[in-house]
Image (cartoon, rainbow, N blue to C red):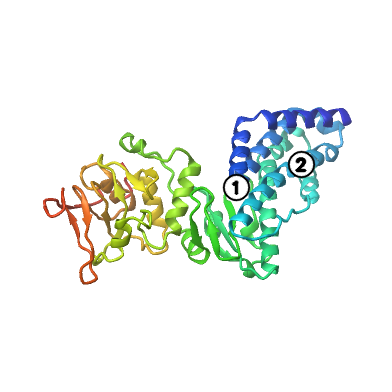
Amino acid sequence: MPEILSTMQQEYEDRSKNDKKLGQIRKQIKAGATYSEAEAYAARSGEILSGVLKNNIDADVFADEDLNGLVVPMMRTNYEKVVSATSSVQATLNKAANIGIKPIVPEFNEGAAFNLVDKMRSYDSFEEAEWLLGEPVVTNSMKCVDEMLRENADFQYRSGMSPKIVRTAEANCCDWCQELAGVYEYSELTNTDEVWQRHANCKCEVTFVPGNGKVQDVHSKAFFDGEKAAERIALSNQPISVGRVPERFSKYVPESKKDRRVIISEGLAADTPVFVIPTETLSVYSKYIEKKEGFYDVVLHGLKSGYGFEFNKTNKIDPDTLCAIIAQRSDYQKGTPIRLISCYSGSKKDGTAQYIANKLGVDVLAPDTKAYVYKPENGISKVIAETQPGKGDGNWITFTPKEKGESK
């Protein structure tokens, strides 16, 4: 057995060192990351461990060897790597939130490792038990991150802070996970609450808003009010859409799922659906726009192509990403028509406005040219569709859903 264990440990170290995906995540964590990257690290490290176990444990080993002496040490080694990476993430978050405490590291859950072996031994043959070396190993790896999150939230709470726990459902997840998605006061949770739990194959994200009331997005470096951010990050009953968009929109899709997730989080955390930087004139004047009865206003820069948007100056986004933000904002009531105060958003029959109308199943009012928001007079800012200020030569077009649920 010592020889098999040594072989497995060396293989695990080699695979971890040379894995490109894990290497990229390490770089992200080193540069400053969130629990999303910690969970990605845990998932990938768990996949590597699963591959090593499957490569070295066969029917003969299952029949003749002490599995506890193989599986438990390997799961401990994986735990050490995962909590090391997560500690770096927690340290970054503490520093960003001006919390001067070191990360709290949980103990290795040896019982979970022994339980996995016990389940394997409950089968008569290796062929029946082999599946336990797959997703259950990955899930256990991700639970290391969840436990560290819980320990740090608990420490902050006992130190007089008020952390909140945020559980984000994976797209197309099961009903159980979808029902658990939301924001929780840590003070109202117990160690056995379902919010901490994972089933096999569960890829939901669990993170928390630090207890000092301020949250810093480590990618944009923007600070949000923790209370308001937590409220807006609470998910609706509809999971984030991650479907493919037609080719005409594809050049505006965020480069990675991570980038998309960051943009959506910023969109949900914003006080109002105005997605331009606060110092811009548009952002200032938009506060005085006269509301159109029965419509939900969304303000952001539109691109001249009519197929994309500019989000907070630095990012281009496709209409599907904007739909994900709108549908999940706590101030949007499902079924409410939308007014897109966004240049060129109604300039194409198959452009952004029509896509949003189809995707959300609501009427969308959008300009067929530029949309100018004027300096407020008597507390009201006019919004006019026109090619140049003062011309008034543009139109507001109403786009109706071509077919309910259609997104093309």
Callout 1 touching callout 2 (CB < 8 Å): no
Identify the residue at image location x=78%, y=29%.
10
For this rendering, which residue is in front, 394 or 364? 394
- Tell me: residue 100, above or below residue 108: below
Q: Quadrant of residue 382?
A: bottom left
Residue 232: x, y in percent?
46, 61
Q: Which residue is mark 1?
A: 202
For this rendering, which residue is in front, 405 or 33? 33
- For marks 1 and 2, give the one nearer the viewer: 2
Residue 325 in view: yes
At numbered mark 1, what does the secondary structure look like: helix, strand or loop? loop
Residue 239 in view: no
Residue 112: x, y in percent?
76, 49
Which image quarter is the N terminus in?
top right
At numbered mark 2, what does the secondary structure look like: helix, strand or loop? helix
Instruction: For label 2, count other residues whose C-alpha is less than 10 Å away and answer few (under 14), some (14-19) or many (20+).
Output: many
Lateral position of residue 68 relative to residue 237, left or right: right
Q: Which residue is mark 2?
A: 75
Q: CA distance from mark 1 to mark 2?
A: 19 Å
Q: Quadrant of residue 70?
A: top right
Identify the residue at image location x=33%, y=38%.
249
Residue 98: x, y in percent?
61, 60
Count every numbered label the image shows and give the total. Answer: 2
Instruction: For label 1, count other residues whose C-alpha is less than 10 Å away and answer few (under 14), some (14-19) or many (20+).
Output: some
Q: Which amino acid, mark 1?
A: Cys
Lateral position of residue 99 relative to residue 70, left or right: left
Q: Which amino acid, mark 2?
A: Met
